[in-house]
């Protein structure tokens, strides 16, 4: 049991291909490696976060679909992974139907918040959001205490973030006044290109200290790991991608520990 309230973090960016699921999996695994009990919640119908930790839910498994539609509670949905301190609420493509079904439900924006209210023995909950600003992502933002935004170090990187920030403003105004920007993470960074360096400078100039010092490099091993159903630390501990996410895990823990003291 933890004496502090679990941190629920939405990992979101409506722009696809920015390393969102990669970040959810590998930050979660890094926190687990530091012996922080971590829960991954797969809120994307593509269910890449689920397969990325090696889970293949059975046809009758309890997933985020049942969680959001009220057919099951959180305790029934949590599955252990093969990695100590890392658990998962899995998803299947069935989740795509939930967005339509939620439209007619009372409190539709708060279904995930209410389901996660019973979290007790996890230090951090990471919610992997779909690449859109639809009702599933709104549920994650309404449930979260913080938002982690991966930004790819390529052209147009900041365009999607401005739209996400407008959505965050609306969520704060109507659904979740306490939603904070937990951090912005620069991903797919290639130090050999002027463009990556320029994007990194622009992001740091725009958002300041909220941007993590850790930068995730473009790394082949990171791209390979999900196909083996393993976080990068279990796939290739010595790779640059693994070392980056371990640094990110340490940096993130330092941030939340400082916030808890404050």
Image (cartoon, grey):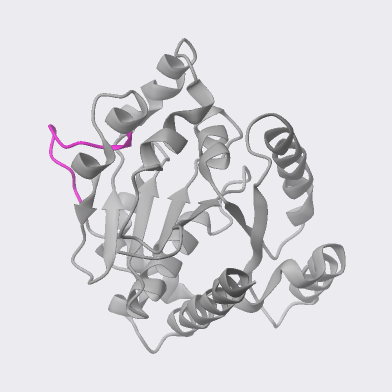
Task: Report the number of numbered marks.
Answer: 0
Residue 252 in which image quadrant: bottom right
x, y (%) of residue 127? 45, 49
Q: Is residue 257 left or right of residue 153?
A: left
Q: Is residue 156 left or right of residue 41?
A: right
The furthest residue to the bottom: 238
Q: Is residue 165 left or right of residue 182?
A: right
**Residue 215 can be seen in this image:** yes
Between residues 3 and 113, which one lies in front from this camera angle? 3
Q: Is residue 104 left or right of residue 163?
A: left
Residue 96 in which image quadrant: top left
The furthest residue to the top: 104
**Residue 223 can be seen in this image:** no
Instruction: Give the answer, above or below, for where 138 lies relative to 90.
Output: above
Residue stretch in magenta: 55-64
x, y (%) of residue 52? 32, 58
x, y (%) of residue 35? 32, 78
x, y (%) of residue 125? 42, 56
Instruction: Give the answer, above or below, for where 46 lies relative to 252.
Output: above
Residue at 62 percent of width and 42 percent of height: 14
The reply to whether the magenta stretch includes residue 26 is no
The reply to whether the magenta stretch includes residue 56 is yes
The chief SS type of the magenta part is loop
Residue at 74 percent of width and 49 percent of height: 161
Residue 1 in which image quadrant: bottom left
Between residues 76 and 224, which one lies in front from this camera angle? 76
Instruction: Give the answer, above or below, for where 29 lies relative to 173.
Output: below
Between residues 40 and 178, which one lies in front from this camera angle? 178
């Amino acid at each position: 049991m933890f004496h502090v309230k679990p941190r629920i973090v939405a990992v979101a960016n409506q722009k696809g291909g920015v390393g969102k699921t990669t970040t959810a999996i590998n930050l979660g695994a890094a926190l687990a490696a530091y012996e922080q009990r971590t829960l991954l919640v797969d809120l994307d119908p593509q269910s890449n976060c689920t397969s990325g930790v090696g889970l293949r839910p059975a046809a009758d498994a309890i997933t985020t679909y049942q969680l959001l539609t009220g057919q099951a509670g959180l305790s029934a949905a949590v599955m252990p992974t093969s990695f100590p301190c890392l658990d998962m609420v899995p998803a299947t493509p069935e989740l795509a139907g939930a967005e339509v079904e939620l439209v007619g439900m009372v409190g539709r924006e708060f279904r995930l918040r209410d389901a996660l209210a019973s979290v007790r023995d996890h230090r951090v909950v990471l919610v992997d959001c779909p690449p859109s600003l639809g009702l599933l992502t709104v549920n994650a933002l309404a449930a979260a205490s913080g938002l982690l935004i991966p930004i790819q170090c390529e052209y147009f990187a900041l365009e999607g973030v401005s739209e996400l920030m407008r959505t965050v403003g609306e969520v704060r105004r109507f659904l979740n006044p306490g939603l904070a920007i937990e951090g912005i993470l620069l991903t797919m960074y290639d130090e050999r290109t002027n463009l990556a360096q320029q994007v990194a400078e622009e992001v740091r100039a725009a958002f300041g200290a909220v941007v993590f010092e850790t930068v995730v490099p473009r790394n082949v091993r990171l791209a390979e790991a999900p196909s083996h159903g393993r976080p990068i630390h279990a796939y290739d501990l010595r790779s640059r991608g693994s070392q980056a996410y371990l640094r990110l895990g340490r940096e993130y823990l330092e941030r939340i520990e400082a916030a808890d003291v404050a």
